[in-house]
Image (cartoon, helix red, strand yellow):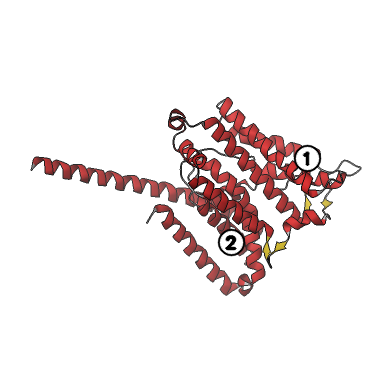
Amino acid sequence: MSRQAVRRIILLALMLLICLMISRVNPIFFSVGNIMKLFQEAAQTGIVAVGFTLVLIAGGMDMSIGAVIAVTSMVCVNFLTYTKLPVAVFVPISLLVGALTGLFNGYFITRFKLPEFIVTLASKSILSGIALVIAVKDSMGFVKNVYIQNETYIWFGGQAFGLVYRATIAFVVLGVATQIFMKKTRAGTNIYATGANAQAASLSGINTTRTVIGIYMFSSICASIAAIFISSRMMTAMPELGIGSEMDVIAAVVIGGTSFSGGQGDLWGTMLGAVFMALVKNVILKMGISPWVQPIVIGGIIVITVIFDVSQKKLAEKLATKAKLRKLALEGGQAAA
């Protein structure tokens, strides 16, 4: 059994244990409505996490995803407030926010060989400022909380097929499609190779520049898609929407088994990680614990997961070394005989 399979079994067992424990304290937990809300919460984080997974597999980092959510939601609110353009027209236009941000990040990272963390952190700062500048304001110049009443736009945050939210459906479709892309296409293989060893990948003929730009564009587009579902569900949007959500996304991806060192991970793990994070938040809410505890819990989960990954990697290397030494000793004994 592979290491990833063991990890997923442990994660599923942990999730089941948490569910059983909270259901004894709060029987409402297993109600259909609460479960559907939990999956909707997982989808909102998970859609962003799908794109971020590719960035991490390629050995990168994207700290701008939260700000992309903020700017995209502000662009949509501006279209709803000041224009009569149909939703089918301005929603694709709003996704350009993500595409251009990803292009900006990827270009500066590859063209000037700048650290991914610095470039995307700068993008985050720029986009946060843009979100404030373009936010709808009242006559006094203060940011106005716009109440979204467009039924077509609100459709994205609603339910379909009974009680299943459209965001959940979008998350599953996007996650499965991306998993197939990563495992069954040459471009997906190139992403893994770039994350494992960018220099070797380049020498083998892989266009690592195009690969890096592509994954950053995809990551930001996923954040823009999530912004539409989040603002539609909330029926409003403010310039700070999505700011700070990076930690939730990172936690979901890392818990799912994608390594910070790059070259390994997949979307099945990320999807499980997103559900786990939504479960943790739901448990905190159902137990009446202060929501201010959430960042502490999320930070602790990330630390524990990284420690687990490092320990597991060291153990695997140790076992591989012992196996190699035994093989050499056996071959030496056979030669002597």
Q: What amino acid is at disc 2?
A: Leu
Q: For the N terminus, which image quadrant?
A: bottom left
Residue 59, x across and y down, in percent: 50, 38
Q: Is residue 97 left or right of residue 113?
A: right
Q: Position of residue 268 (x, y in %)?
A: 51, 54
Q: Position of residue 63 (x, y in %)?
A: 61, 40
Farthest-out residue, front: 185
Please tell me which residue is depicted at 39% across the width and 50% down the height of the picture. Answer: 312
Tell me if I can see residue 108 in this picture.
Answer: yes
Whichever of labels 2 and 1 marks the residue nearer the N terminus, that label is: 1
Q: Residue at x 68, y 40 (%)?
A: 98
Q: Residue at x 61, y 59 (%)?
A: 281
Most extreme residue toward the right is 139
Left or right of residue 149, residue 68 in this image: left
Tell me the SS state at disc 2: helix
Say which of 15 and 39 sits in front.
39
Residue at the extreme top: 112
* Kind of residue sitting beneath label 1: Leu
- Mark identifier at residue 311: none
Judge left or right: residue 215 versus residue 242.
left
- Sort mark 2 into few (<14), some (14-19) or many (20+) by Cα contacts within 10 Å: many
User: On the image, which quarter does residue 123 sit in?
Assistant: top right
The quarter of the picture where the C terminus appears is top left
> Is label 1 in a helix, a strand or a loop?
helix
Residue under numbered circle 2 = 279
Image location of residue 32, percent across then percent down? 64, 70
Q: Which residue is mark 1?
A: 132
Q: Please name whichever residue, 245 or 112, is drawn nearer the observer in this view of the structure.
A: 112
Say whether marks 2 and 1 touch (CB < 8 Å): no
Quick check: can you spot residue 243? Answer: no
Spatial CA span between label 2 and label 1: 32 Å
